[in-house]
Amino acid sequence: MHLQFARGWLELGNIQEAEAELGNIRPQYFGCPDVLEIRFQVLARRQCYTEGLAIAKQHVADFPTDFRGHMNQANALFWLNRPQEAIDSVMDILPQHPKIAALPYNLACYWMKLGDAAQAVHWLESAMQIGLRKGVIQHALSDPDLRPIWDYIRELEESGDGD
């Protein structure tokens, strides 16, 4: 129940209450993947990226087939201004999770941080092939990481191909 409450508080944007609920979880559950996920999300909201990276690395080490740990690890690396490491981290697990649109979407952001718009477009298009095209486009148009290619994304939105 505390995990569900923590998730709910986090969704409502109340980080302090989410942390309080996490504090009520018994220590034997601290290493469970869902608990690690919420702990990471709380740290990310607090912009504690180094601590978040440590949680994500634990998640990856203990649950290597759970894409969330890898995705969180890559995001923490990205936020720590280590985009090439973030790319490498996602590329390592991408073949095992071909139906997770968030992975190529995040690669688009990471490549954009490196200034490679062509790679960013490639990975954004991959995300649109996996996920709901319209939803990916809407999300991308609100993502400041992808601002340099917003004109291209708007063209995709206007073309409406594949909706």
Image (cartoon, rainbow, N blue to C red):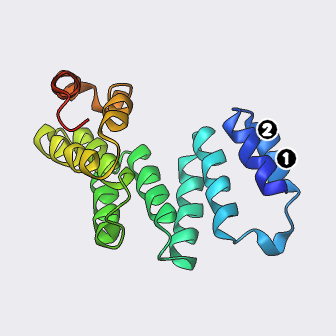
Q: At 69% from the left edge and 32% from the top edge, which residue is drawn?
A: 13
The amino acid at mark 1 is: Ala
Q: Position of residue 30 (x, y in %)?
A: 75, 68
Q: In the image, 61: left or right of 118?
A: right
Along the line of sight, the residue nearer the viewer: 67 or 130:
130
Quadrant of the rendering where the C terminus is positioned: top left
**Residue bearing mark 1:** 20
Quarter location, residue 145: top left
Relative to 112, is 131 above or below? below
Q: In the displayed image of the protein, which residue is found farthest to the front?
A: 163
Kind of residue sitting beneath label 2: Gln
Q: Residue at x 36, y 67 (%)?
A: 97
**What residue is shown with label 2?**
16
Mark 2 touches mark 1? (CB < 8 Å): yes
Q: Quadrant of residue 70?
A: bottom left
**Residue 88: % across, % down:** 28, 63
Residue 158: % across, % down: 19, 21
Which residue lies at the image location 55% right of the left edge and 76% below the top edge? Answer: 63
Seen at 52% across and 67% down, the residue is 57
Q: Name the image quarter holding residue 140.
A: top left
Using a 10 Å C-alpha cutoff, classify the residue at mark 1 as few (fewer than 14 neighbours), some (14 to 19) or many (20 or more): some
Q: Which mark is residue 88?
A: none
